[in-house]
Image (cartoon, rainbow, N blue to C red):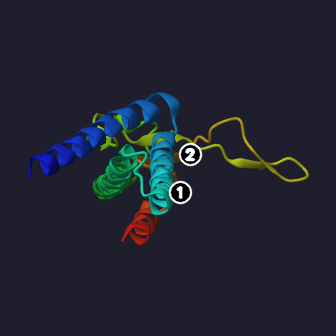
Amino acid sequence: MKKTFKFISKVIFGILIWLILVDIQWTFFDSHSIENLIFIVFGIFLLLLIISGIYWVFKKKRILKFAGFGTLYFLAFSITMILTNVVYGKIAESQFIVLLKDIEKYKIEKGQIPKVLSDLPTEHYNVYGIVPHEFIYEGYKPFIWNGIGFDESEIDSETEKIVGYKTPMGYTKYRIADDENIDDVIENVIKNVW
């Protein structure tokens, strides 16, 4: 019983460290490479376990004794990490829909979408690690015709924005505009989520 409790404690501690690292990587590096690294390490331990199993079958000797525990730990850690991301995803999606409804109210009152999220009367925060952060709200660079094809503009549109949210395993972004019905965007979010 004590060993099981210790094992569960280690997994929970690992998840907390992972969430702190996710905060750091999304805030400063805008990537989600930590998850890939964890799955690679899990794959390596699984490979080592298979090798030690084959060696035992032929030589009847145990090698790489740590591989069994390591594989079990990283399997439990990976499953818990995925479940944690699902929980964060559901919370983020619900909060994101509330944010979009607030933007729609603002657009009806002011005739345009807000320039920055702080223009909204209510503060909206997205938790994608441990610390709450503001939702993604950035300029949209429209595509312009260059005579041959379409290139992304270097200048942000005055009437369009990219709005989105992050979860520990990635982010989702949508384009919204002054002349667009944001209810349609909300429907798209609900359709993609549920």
Dot 2: few (<14), some (14–19), or many (≥20) neighbours within 10 Å?
Answer: some
Which residue is painted at 46% across and 53% down in the image? 52
Report how far apart the C-alphas of labels 1 and 2 lie in the structure. 8 Å
Q: Relative to 92, is 179 on the left or the right?
A: right
Which residue is painted at 42% across and 45% down in the image? 64
Residue 56 visible within the image: yes
Q: Mark 2: which secondary structure?
A: loop
Q: Relative to 178, is 93 on the left or the right?
A: left
Q: Identify residue type, mark 2.
A: Thr
**Residue on which the image places disc 2:** 159
Q: Mark 1: which secondary structure?
A: loop
Q: Is residue 16 above or below residue 170?
A: above
Residue 154 image position (x, y, % from top left) = 71, 35
Residue 105 visible within the image: no
Q: Relative to 55, is 98 on the left or the right?
A: left
Q: Is residue 33 above or below residue 189?
A: above
Residue 159 image position (x, y, % from top left) = 56, 45
Give the mark nearest the N terminus, 1 or 2: 2
